[in-house]
Image (cartoon, coloured by chain):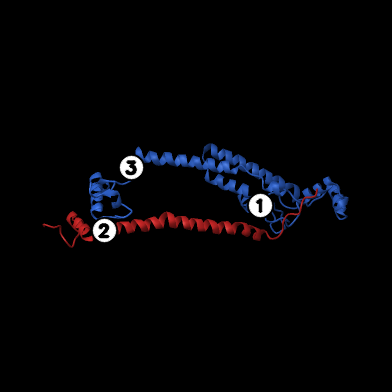
Amino acid sequence: MSLAKPAMRGLLGKRLRFHLPIAFALSLVAAAAFKYGVTEPRKQAYADFYKQYDTTKEFNNMRDAGVFESVRPTGE
Amino acid sequence: MWTHILLKDKYCSVSSSLVFQMLHLTKGCVGCLLSRRAVLALTNSGARMSSHDHHEVSNNLDMSQPMYSDRLDTPLPDRPWKDVLDSTDKSLKQNEKGPWTALSKEEKITLYRLKFNHTYPEMKRPSHEWKTVIGGMFILFGITGLLSLNLLFFFSCVYPPQPHTFGEEWQAKQIQRMLDMRINPIEGFSAQWDYKNKQWK
């Protein structure tokens, strides 16, 4: 019975050479996916919202709904 | 006897886990199954003891002597498997002192089995313990579910009365106030409400 001698050395190095590039690549992909899937749309949503935002009008709407404690609704 | 089993924990992890399961699950047929498997494990270990350590009292292990162990992380145990050799084994051991190329395949295998109990594949053989574990787990889930749901619906109510803020009217007023305050108007709550048409988008 003569089996081939198994690899005795360099096992960690071999594993790292295989797994580390994959790990880095997948991490970069995950980061890019999060950036372009989540943060960029969110920034855009905020920008669009505040382009059309009239502060005074919103304040008066909220005041008339009665949610403020410092000002009562108009007409009271 | 229980201490003997627990001491051998280092060497027979299967039997000790069965013992602990026996201690926890003493219900009906499950307990029978496990006690049968535990008895099997114990008789195996008893057989191993009796044929090799004739200088020890039957049930007590002399832990001050080097011990044999089948462990994946210890390839060469402290003592060989068979200490007491009969005459054929002794002559084989004499042959072992010469060149190994002179030994036949069967002799080499006999020498291996003298020195070791299990081979690595035999040590790594899968046990069917997981089925007992999963089965016992599901049985306990079922019993717990029966008990808790029974208590909840049919017997004394285990929960106190709900807070008044959970009622339909209060919830509606709460939602209206959140919309008035413009909670999360960009991506969240109030963003889903159409303020012009007074309805959900």
Q: Name the residue under label 2.
A: A53
Chain that is red in the image:
A
Residue drawn at x 17%, y 55% is A64
User: Residue at label 3?
Assistant: B157
Identified at 25% across, 52% down, the residue is B179
Who's the residue at 16% across and 61% down the image?
A71
Which amino acid, mark 1?
Tyr
Q: Can residue A67 be seen in this view?
A: no
- Looking at the image, which residue sits at the far left? A76
* Residue B191 percent across, percent down from the top left: 30, 52
Answer yes or no: is residue B23 visible.
yes
In the picture, measured across the screen, residue B60 lies left or right of residue A30, that is right
Tell me, for residue B59, which label it has, or none: none
Q: Which residue is drawn at 58% across and 58% down?
A: A21
- Distance of label 2 from label 3 (alpha carbons): 51 Å
CA–CA distance in space, label 2 to label 1 = 73 Å
Of label 1 and label 3, which has the lower sequence position?
A: 1
The colour of chain B is blue
Q: Is residue B146 above or below residue B78?
A: above
Q: Are marks 1 and 3 in contact (CB under 8 Å)?
A: no
Q: Nearer the viewer, mark 2 or mark 1?
A: 2
**Dot label at residue B11:** 1
Q: What element carries label 3?
A: loop
Q: Which of B150 and B165 is in front in this view?
A: B165
> Mark 1: which secondary structure?
loop
Q: Which of the image's four quarters has the C terminus of chain A?
A: bottom left
Mark 2 residue type: Tyr
Residue B170 percent coordinates (x, y): 23, 48
Chain letter for the residue marked with disc 2 in the picture: A
Q: How crowded is mark 3: few (under 14 residues within 10 Å), some or many (20 or more)?
A: few
Q: Residues within 10 Å of mark 1 (few under 14, many from 20)?
A: some
Kind of residue at badge 3:
Cys
